[in-house]
Amino acid sequence: MAPSILQSVRGSKKSGTLDSIEETLEDQVEALKAELASLSKNLRERGRDQGRRTRRKAEAGVDDLIQSGEEILGELRDLYGRSEAQVRSTVHRHPLATIGAAAAFGLVVALLARR
């Protein structure tokens, strides 16, 4: 171990109190080092555990989002299918009106395209 600060103070004194103080300080430093190591280990473990919990929550959230997206997609397919059937029915019932509407739409697009 490196020479202590107290060695220079001790000088030629033969007092046992300085030796005991130095030993006490060294013991306290060692105890603090051990405690810091223990705290560091506990922090690492808690961080690792918190990371795992957060990851599980995120994965559960992603699964919920995927399930919601699939439900919405199914609803959109149903809506599209019903709309398609309704358009077909309208075209079959009113063929001349459908041709007229398509012609009017084409005319409007052609006029807008000229500008």
Image (spheres, rainbow, N blue to C red):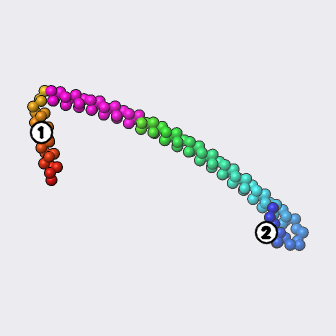
Displayed quadrant of residue 61: top left
Residue picked out by circle 1 = 103
Does residue 21 appear in this view? no
Horizontal side of 91 relative to 63 (left or right) equals left
| Magenta stretch bounds | 67-92
Considering only vertical position in the picture, is 100 above or below 89?
below
Displayed quadrant of residue 90: top left
Q: What residue appears at the point 84 percent right and 62 percent down from the top-left corner?
A: 20
Q: What residue appears at the point 48 percent right and 37 percent down from the top-left corner?
A: 60
Considering only vertical position in the picture, is 16 above or below 49?
below
User: What separation in Å lies between label 2 and label 1 (alpha carbons)?
Assistant: 101 Å
Give percent across and percent down for residue 65: 41, 38
Give percent across and percent down for residue 50: 56, 44
Q: Residue type at mark 2?
A: Ile
Q: Secondary structure at mark 2?
A: helix
Does residue 95 appear in this view? yes
Q: Which label is found at residue 5?
A: 2
Displayed quadrant of residue 76: top left
Do tag 2 and tag 1 residues touch (Cβ < 8 Å)? no
Query: Does the magenta run of residues contain 11?
Result: no
Q: Residue type at mark 1?
A: Ala
Front-most of residues 7 and 13: 7
Considering only vertical position in the picture, is 74 above or below 57?
above
Q: Which SS does the magenta portion mostly show?
A: helix
Q: Secondary structure at mark 1?
A: helix
Horizontal side of 109 relative to 7 (left or right) equals left
Considering only vertical position in the picture, is 17 above or below 79?
below
Is the N terminus in the top left, top right, bottom left or bottom right quadrant? bottom right
Front-most of residues 84 and 17: 84
